Image (cartoon, rainbow, N blue to C red):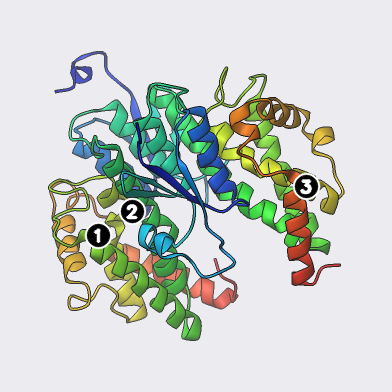
Amino acid sequence: MDERKYNMAEEVKVFSTWASPFALRVIWALKLKGVEFDTVHEDLINKSPLLLQYNPIHKKVPVLVHDGKVICESLVILEYIDETWKQNPLLPEDPHQKANARFWAKFGDDKVMQSIGGGVLLKEGKEQEEGFAASMENLKYLEEEIRGKKFFGGETIGLADIALGWLAHYLDIVEEIVGLKLIDQEKFPSLAAWKQEFANAPIIRENWPDRDKLVTKYVVVREANLGKGTPK
Amino acid sequence: MADEVTLLDFWLSPFGMRVKIALAEKEVKYEYSEQNLMNRKSDLLLKMNPVYKKIPVLVHHGKPVCESLIILQYIDAVWKGKAPLLPSDPYERAQSMFWADFIDRKVHDISKKLWTTKGEELEAAKKDFFECLELLERELGEKPYFGGEALGYVDIALLPFSCGFYTYETIGDFSIEARFPKIRAWVDRCLKKESVAKSLAEPEKVHEFILETRKGLGFD
């Protein structure tokens, strides 16, 4: 057990929004490690002066403040959390396996989220067809990677699971809004199984944002994007 | 002792240069395999990086590592004995990772616009580029390197883009030395190190390549 828990009270704050899948990663990681923290709820239309002071470059959530030390960018924060609180490690010790976990986390952000969010949710017609096709390619790679494993991290939840975890809740919402099935049980049986496993895992299952509120929010975002005619 | 390290790379890639600098800093012997990206991608590349089909790829004991920053972290973890790239303190590491991420998100795309756009678009790209360099110069401060007293992760992430500085200045009609003297001084300081000098492409060759590409894109 990390002796830090028994020493002076640490101050851990997470700046987040109710809907942010990125902030959710940080919340999951801290809770999985049993780290106590306070949440500062932000309204992105009306960002607090403190958020702008802590994250002047990107002006986004999440931000982690640990005993006055400020860390931004969710994947950077996850690595910081894993190095600072050693219980329930998110990354393996072996450098090649570590590199692999980081690769899939980054693939999730650079490719999967882009194709599903930008390419499917925010588009229609031919553009959406292209986004859908790209998403299928990307999901195929994830299917191959997860095959034979309970989690991307192996037997326990790891960095890649946390980074890709949004798929286990937000994807259903995208599918409902656009009327398309992305993670089809027949096409991607291993990924579908992982989705279930992850969505229902302890801690994860207690922290999903409200489904109906998310549907409402993303319908608005989609319509705003289509109305404007310019990609986000 | 053969450590079986191969680097799949393309001479012009700033991402590949990052890996070359890191391997040189750590004095790792490796086989360099130039991948001609203009032709059909090699079977080796497709096997080692099936997802992105891109370079750089570091192959160590037959196993690939892809994505340049992930490769840098791998190199730092495996060859621990010499020239640490990342700080050992978790907070300092996080700051280095933040800035490398910033460089990835901003510098590459913006600097590409400096030679693929013109008119208003070019002016907008210049403005973004200057904002980037301003932030980076502020982060560098009075330190000799972004890493502090020694070359580190952030230095290595940014250095390859300096190969294009002469080209951007010529096309964009501005001077980095005049606007960002600390950045210019930092580049010159780093170039004095052998690991950097032999890893970066020559600005003249980069310039030639970019001018040829611009002709193909329809620029004067």
- Given residues A45 and A133, the one toward you in this image is A133
Whether callout 1 and callout 3 share a subunit is answered no
Amino acid carrying mark 2 in the image: Trp
- Give the image location of residue A64, x and y in percent: 39, 34
- Given residues B213 and B60, the one toward you in this image is B60
Residue A62 visible: no
**Residue at label 3?**
B204
Question: Where is residue B144, by image quadrant?
Answer: top right
Q: How far apart are the two marked residues, 2 and 1, measured between alpha carbons?
A: 9 Å
Q: Secondary structure at mark 2?
A: helix
Give the chain letter at badge 1: A
Q: Secondary structure at mark 3?
A: helix
**Residue at label 2?**
A104
- Give the image location of residue B176, x and y in percent: 79, 38
Amino acid carrying mark 3 in the image: Glu
Q: Residue at x 70, y 31 (%)?
A: B187
Q: Secondary structure at mark 1?
A: helix
User: In the image, which is nearer the foreground, mark 3 or mark 2?
Assistant: 3
Q: Is the residue under label 1 in contact with that under label 2 (CB below 8 Å)?
A: yes
Residue B32 visible: yes
Say which mark, if any, is on residue A145.
1
Query: Which quadrant is home to the N terminus of chain B?
Result: top left
